[in-house]
Image: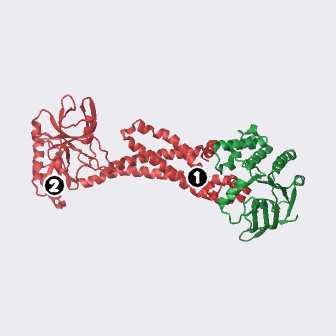
Chain colours: A red, B green
Amino acid sequence: MLRHLFKLIWNKKGTHSLLIIEVWAAFMVLFGVLTLIVFNLRNYLQPIGFQYEQVWNLELSSNQDTTELAPKLQRALQRVRAYPEVITASRMSSNTPFSANQIGNSVTYNKVNVGGDFYYTDTELAKVLDLPLKKGRWYAESDLAGKFIPIVINQAMEDKLFQNESGLNKVIKRDDKTMYKVVGIVDRFKAKGQFMSDTPGLFQILEKNDRWNSNILIKTKPGTDAHFEARLVKDIAMLLPGWGVEVGYLKDSRKNRENLTLVPVLIFLIVSGFLLTNVALGLFGVLNLNIAKRKGEIGLRRAMGATESKVTGQFLGEIWVLATFSLIIGLIFAVQFPLMNVFDLDKEIYIIAILAAVAVIYIIVTICAWFPSKQAATIHPAVALHEE
Amino acid sequence: MIKLQNVEKVYRTSSIETLALNNINIDVKKGEFVSIMGPSGCGKSTLLNIIGLLDAPSKGQIEIDGSPVERYTDKHLAELRNRKLGFIFQSFHLINDLSVIDNVEIPLLYRNTSAKQRRELAQAALEKVGLSNRMKHFPKQLSGGQKQRVAIARAIVGNPEIILADEPTGNLDSAMGNEILGILQKLNSDGATIVMVTHDEAMAKKTDRLIRLFDGTQVS
């Protein structure tokens, strides 16, 4: 029977070509959207790697002030740490968690070059963000006395840079003048939020006289409220006259950041939803028309021994065969993505998206074909034969 | 072989009730070639549809091969149509998107027959009707007579005991009609029981028995 259906559809390929293209286009759009969804969902299911609930971001900007910035920043940090509401605080570069800022660079080890996010922080960041170390330790100020700049890397960086070796205590190079020593390895640090993929990252110690990195992450005690925030802003503004002082909560930044990821996905979903609805309605219409035009054939098949269920099965089978033609063409395009490693995504993401898109297409065509096929089966054979 | 007792067929709509067949009693013996004649609208095709289990009577009983079929399920009826009956229609009812041989194979699709066996049986049926050289052609490439021969091949491919022909020569010229009748007579002489609806008195006279209908009633 399957062979018969393939033959029937193949012989009518000219008539069905637009339908085949329509299903193919729906598959391609669905594949794209599902890749995006699978990519984000996989990221979402991976832990973020740090705690942010009680963490505030104090953003300082020196504005017109250009004198003694480093000591002023150190004083501000000491002041913040002195509050009883504060558990600890750490200076950090502008690419604080969930911010839109990014600092990227690459490092080399044994001719393997890996790009990643660079975070400039002091010795307290691990405590502020409860960032657990898998290996080694967080850098200390005493490390600055060493020959190499101490850094902590994440697991993704270790995996890519050192592959099967351990990265601990290894010396890596940023450029001819800058050499790092890995003193610790953390598991994950998804600074851009839950939907960020676990990309290579590196934490570098801030020098004492650093004047550029003016964010302070503050871990507050539970229950610390806006009264403290107001006091903090007022005190720091008095300590650093003329400076801009702004406080943000990391949990709010996280929500904003995740919305930025979710909105495009939602837009794509809505657009593809419309497209799929159009395809479904188109298919439904075409099948209804097709069945109306093929009443004689239905009557003939019933006369030749087809049961009602066989007639339903035939029309469902035809649409599956048609969808299979479309999907074969679609798969030729879709498999290029994992094969050619497009967008540097895991092959698994593409494979899941392909399988899900194939399943959705089959489900849609089945739903669309079910009603007309059932209708076809209930046409009385004598009536069907008479109507041609 | 085919027995109809007190068969009545009424078509009902919300406002009209039409009596299409009234008190029909027919007994067709195995190996008989029976023709049904009558003016247009007298119920010939309705009767053939009832004999062919494509339609159910409003009243009365039908027996095929001694078994009453009223309580048969859709599956049983389909199986009976597939195994015992072969249909030939005035308008051929060939599927234009399938080749001649694929059209002939259709009844065998509803049996457990292998693809190879289907092909062999279809080829043999086409040889019987003299169309073995047109197997790969499509219906649109054939003349009316050739189309009807394909339809006959399709009707006999499953080796049914009964062939039901609804005006098989109605769309053909007389020469072609005689040719088709010749094939049917040959099938009858080979053992098939044939019931043929026709308008053509001359054709009907060449069959073993004639049943006449008028206004839904059997007159002879």
Query: Can you say which quadrant of the picture contains the C terminus of chain A?
Result: bottom right
Q: Residue B41's spot in the image, x, y percent?
A: 82, 61
- A119 sits left or right of A25 in the view: left
How many residues crowd around disc 2 within 10 Å: few (fewer than 14), some, or many (20 or more)?
some
* Mark 2 element type: helix
- A288 sits left or right of A175 in the view: right
Chain name for mark 2:
A
Determine whether B68 is above or below A301 in the image.
below
Q: Are marks 1 and 2 in contact (CB under 8 Å)?
A: no
* Mark 1 element type: helix
Note whether residue A237 is visible: no
Number of numbered labels in the structure image? 2
How many residues crowd around disc 1 within 10 Å: few (fewer than 14), some, or many (20 or more)?
many
Determine whether A4 is above or below A228 in the image.
above
Determine whether A141 is above or below A46 in the image.
above
Residue under pointer 2: A233
Q: Residue A84's spot in the image, x, y percent?
A: 10, 57
**How far apart are the two marked residues, 1 and 2, measured between alpha carbons?**
68 Å
Label drawn at residue A316:
1
Q: Residue A284's spot in the image, x, y percent?
A: 58, 54
Q: Residue A32's spot in the image, x, y percent?
A: 44, 45
